[in-house]
Image (cartoon, rainbow, N blue to C red):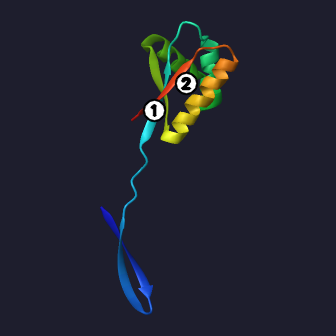
Amino acid sequence: MSKRTKIEEDGETLAVERDKSKKPKRYFVLMHNDDYTTQEFVVHVLMHFFHKAEPEAYRMMLMVHVQGKAKVGVYTKDVAESKVAIVMDHARQNGMPLLLTAEPE
């Protein structure tokens, strides 16, 4: 779909067609369950990096634990990949093997 823009030039009105910008593709950040990362650490990550309130962070942690993985956020590709890298670096610095992935919506 194109968008028409009117431009005045020397008293004349010109119509210029422009392609409409597409919305950027969105990506889910998924958190995966493992047998070593503590539940407390997962809640901490969800609160600190994904800005979840404690009750929601606890609920999401249980979802990851029971279902094996859960969506913890939806972002543009760059933001999703950045979140994955930052959180996994933080987890490694704290001796946790927490795994996150970014997948298209």
Residue 54 vs 81, above or below: the answer is above
Residue 23 vs 63, above or below: the answer is below
Q: Mark 2 points at which residue?
A: 56
Distance, label 2 to label 1, CA atoms, is 17 Å
Q: Quadrant of the N terminus?
A: bottom left
In this rendering, does residue 52 appear at all? no
Q: Residue 16 has which mark?
A: none
Q: Which of marks 2 and 1 is nearer the N terminus?
A: 1
**In front of the other: label 2 or label 1?**
1
Image coordinates for residue 96, horizontal then vertical, percent: 63, 14
- Picture quarter containing residue 12? bottom left
Residue type at the position of mark 2 = Glu
Which is more toward the observer, 67 or 82? Answer: 82
Determine the residue positioned at 61% across, 26% down.
87
Q: Residues within 10 Å of mark 1 (few under 14, many from 20)?
A: many
Q: How crowded is mark 2: few (under 14 residues within 10 Å), some or many (20 or more)?
A: some
Image coordinates for residue 33, horizontal then vertical, percent: 50, 14
- Name the outermost residue toward the left: 1
- Name the outermost residue toward the top: 35
Residue type at the position of mark 1 = Phe
Determine the residue positioned at 43% across, 40% down.
26
Which is more toward the observer, 24 or 44? Answer: 24
- Picture quarter containing residue 10? bottom left
Image coordinates for residue 66, horizontal then vertical, percent: 45, 11
Determine the residue positioned at 45% across, 36% down.
27
Q: Mark 1 points at which residue?
A: 28
SS under mark 1: strand
SS under mark 2: helix
The answer to whether 8 appears left or right of 49 in the picture is: left
Residue 21 vs 54, above or below: the answer is below
